[in-house]
Every structure is written in C-alpha cells, then in structure tokens.
Amino acid sequence: AQTVTQSQPEMSVQEAETVTLSCTYDTSESDYYLFWYKQPPSRQMILVIRQEAYKQQNATENRFSVNFQKAAKSFSLKISDSQLGDAAMYFCACLNYGGSQGNLIFGKGTKLSVKP
Amino acid sequence: SAVISQKPSRDICQRGTSLTIQCQVDSQVTMMFWYRQQPGQSLTLIATANQGSEATYESGFVIDKFPISRPNLTFSTLTVSNMSPEDSSIYLCSVRAHSGNTIYFGEGSWLTVV
C-alpha cells in the first residue's frame, strides 16, 4: 500500500523568505505522480505543483519548486519569496498512475504560517 | 483543467437526517471520487463513483451510510445518511480528467451535525 508522510505539522516563515516543506512517500509502483496541494481557510484544495516520477527534472511553478529524490522517495516543496497569501495547509499526495482506482493518497499536512 | 461545482457549500444538519451533496463537472471525466476531511485531519477517500454502476467503497465506508450515484460522466451525488455529530466534516468531490494525470477538487461541502 502507498503511504505519504509529512513530518512537519507546522512551519513558519518570514515574508519574502524561503521555506521548504518535507514529504516522503512509499510505493511499490514504478510509475506514479506526486503533488502538492494548498488548502487555505476557504477549504478549497488548490493544486500547487505536480511531478511525474519518470522525469528527473524537478518541477517548478513560479515561486514554487520541488526537490524530487526518487531513490530516497523524497518530495519536498520549496516556496521562495513567501507571501502572506501562502499561509495555508499544504498536503503532499501520491497518485498511482497505473492503478485501477487512480485516487490520491495524502499526507497529514503541514500548516504554514507567514509572518509579516 | 476541470471546473467543479459542489452544492451545498455549507449546511447545518439535524441528527438522524440525511443530506445529499451534488458534484457537477464542466467536462467529461474518467473518474470521480468522494473524500472526507474530518476537523483538523487530512483527506480520506470514501469511494470511487462509477458511471452507471455501484460505487467502489474504501475500507470503513459502506453503501448504506454513504450511497453514491453517478448517472453520467459529469455528475455525481453523495448522500450522508442518518447523520450523527461524528459525520461533521468537509466532503470533497474530485475528478481525474481524460487528458492527464491530475486530480482536481470541488470547493467542498462543510457539514455540521447538531
């Protein structure tokens, strides 16, 4: 069974600084996708960034980038130039690409606070 | 991307009653899922909504408590039956589109059972 672990229940960052959120996962599949979702107080789940496991290059989306270490099964999220609007819960998730269900397995989440 | 509309966005329900949540997608999608997020917790998959057939439920979730319908490729409903305070949660509809391997979420339905 797939598992996703986020070891940081809470993190804090100063506005304009950089913060890294950690995530490790375990899967027996050779083909899978990894995601970071953001959940602000509105409760909407917003896709932040996606990484295909077969790609060695780390995904980037503007101020958001990942450090994908496939051998170590690690998938951390780096937020650069942090903004007040980045404050939210962040969930790491794994999608079983080849699975019949194709659903997401989530970590427990990391609550990010941004200090002005 | 897919645009997902969920109704209701929020409701307060009486113990013992049932409530049906609707999920409408703006395009045909391969898979639709229903998740539950209990207060302060992560998301847990309830079931996969299958078009024209019975949903596939995860361990710990049963059809009598969470009946699901999916009459076509763009619409699904989740009913929370005989509610108790323990059912107070956010219920989220999500979809996996034909074109890729990204999963999108609706705004969620925040239910409080009193």
Image (spheres, coloured by chain):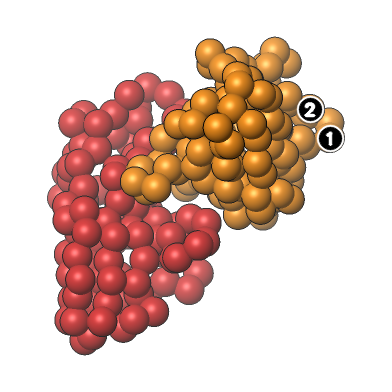
Q: Residue at x 35, y 30 (%)?
A: B97
Q: Is residue B87 left or right of residue B42?
A: left
Q: Amino acid at mark 2?
A: Gln
Q: Which mark is residue A69?
A: 2
The red-coloured chain is labelled B
Placement of the C terminus of chain A among the 4 image quadrants: top right
Q: Amino acid at mark 1?
A: Ala
The image shows residue A109 at horizontal and vertical percentages of 59, 50
Looking at the picture, tell me which residue is in the foreground, A34 or B101.
A34
Find the distance from the CA under tag 1 to the CA under tag 2. Answer: 5 Å
Q: Is residue B80 left or right of residue A91?
A: left
Question: In the figure, A59 relative to B2: above or below?
Answer: above
Q: Is residue A29 visible?
A: no
User: Which of the 4 image quadrants contains residue A55?
Assistant: top right
Q: Which mark is residue A72?
A: 1
Dot 1 falls on which chain?
A
